[in-house]
Amino acid sequence: MPKKLAQFFAKKKEEAKFKLAGPGRKLNAESQPTTSQKKSKDAYVKPVRKEAGQEARNAAAAAMARCTQKDTKEFNTSLAAIQAQVRRELEAERRAKEETAKVPQPEVQDDRRNLAVQGVYFRCPLVSDEVLSKVEWRSKIKEFLYDQLNQEDGELSACLIIQNCNTKEKADACVETLTKYLENIINHPDEEKYRKIRMSNRIFSEKVRNVEGSMEFLFAAGFEEQIIDGEAFLVYFSKGENFTEQLQVLLDALMCAEKINLEIDRNIQVLLPSQAKKNELPPDFFRMSIEELKREQQLKSEALESSLVLKTKAMREREELRIVNRYRYTLIRVRFPDGVYLQGTFNVYEKFLQVHEFVQSCMKHESVEFHLVGPTGHKFEEEDFEKSLYDLRLVPNILLIFSYDDPDTAPPGNYIKEELLMLIQPL
């Protein structure tokens, strides 16, 4: 694990250098890249199709791993039976649409079994291969970092604890103060006064002492607690002749440390038509609490009742944007011609390219060209690939229609990989 932390910091330092270098450009490139030049870095290039991205493959692999852990009795392992079930449901849908009688529906209880998805889950390769909720990862990361304190690179763990176990405001104020402590010693190595920190000092008490990881960082740097004239101090004891170089390395680590990023897990599900009717989302998808959303909806209803003004286009766009801003995540469903639905969870700021790669990674024939059509009939092309789901308004739960580019040459059989079809759960 210490090796992973060292690699993490090395990567962050390289990223910092890269950002300082400014935007890159080829020596023989034009000042404004053409469309064809931009496409060279895309994951999808015609006519030769690029393999699915690693993230999309990881999502598919995670789903397959979860599938193998489940009791086989919970899955209908017969592909023929699954296909028959889909056909029956599609036929039932057609019959239901032809019926004119309207049957009043009972009020749906607030039960997680009625939700389209149970929650939002994440992966953190730096820590483990588990798939957990964000709350579970917070405690898992904290436990992991504290376990690393006694390892060879314990000071690196202390830097990460400061960033990951405190609020951003507390972490930033602490890093700023610790930076001054170390810089004073580096710049004035012979000044005794810079090697002592009075623990009763107001700045130390407010910005350092109560911040998780700060004391561990100072001890790793070479400070020791001592009583001088009846008062508690932290006193720095140099470690060898090149102690200023050692402190500089530690200072660099402190300044480039940041929160450990979580990777959203696609939480792949394959659904029958009847199962795809559920579209309620759990609280994890919202930026606001359920109570706040209900209160906002009530205020909106009251405003509509008291106002009969016609909305302009600008007013409608502002209203649409306000609704979209409620969500952190979006649930993307893709309907295949055989009636099967593929479902995955995405951050609203992910690119449409990642949706395209996700679908490609789940296809039985990954090399066959295909396109996705939105709820308004818009066919998503390459120019949409670099746009975010937020910009495309594919929020909060969207149905896309799958189609091969050339249906006449489409391969026979299932659209989705057989191992993913095993994810279909019995009704």
Image (cartoon, grey):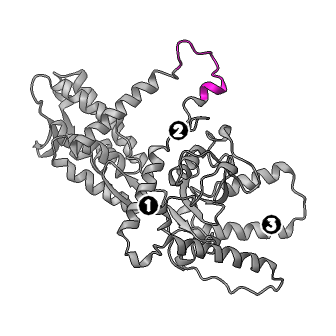
Mark 3 / mark 2, whichever is N-terminal? 2
Residue 63's tag is 1
Which is nearer the eye, 42 or 164? Answer: 42
Is residue 44 visible from the viewing direction of this image?
yes
Q: Give the range drawn in magenta.
A: 25-38
Mark 2 / mark 1, whichever is N-terminal? 2
Mark 3 / mark 1, whichever is N-terminal? 1
* Contact flag, marks 3 and 1 (Cβ < 8 Å): no
Residue visible at 33% across and 47% down in the picture: 206
Q: How crowded is mark 3: few (under 14 residues within 10 Å), some or many (20 or more)?
A: few
Which is nearer the eye, 231 or 38? Answer: 38
Q: Label 2 sits on what residue type? A: Lys
Which label lies toward us, 2 or 1? 2
Is residue 201 visible from the viewing direction of this image?
no
As measured in the structure, the alpha-carbon distance from the residue carrying label 3 to the one carrying label 2 is 51 Å
Q: How crowded is mark 1: few (under 14 residues within 10 Å), some or many (20 or more)?
A: some
Name the image quarter holding residue 381. Answer: top right
Q: Position of residue 122 (x, y in %)?
A: 43, 56
Determine if the magenta segment contains residue 26: yes
Provide the residue designation for mark 3.
303
Direction top: furthest residue: 28
Q: Position of residue 133 (x, y in %)?
A: 42, 62
Residue visible at 78% across and 77% down in the picture: 97
As measured in the structure, the alpha-carbon distance from the residue carrying label 3 to the one carrying label 1 is 45 Å
Which is nearer the eye, 186 or 346? Answer: 346
Provide the residue designation for mark 2.
50
Q: For this view, does 218 lie left or right of residue 230?
A: right
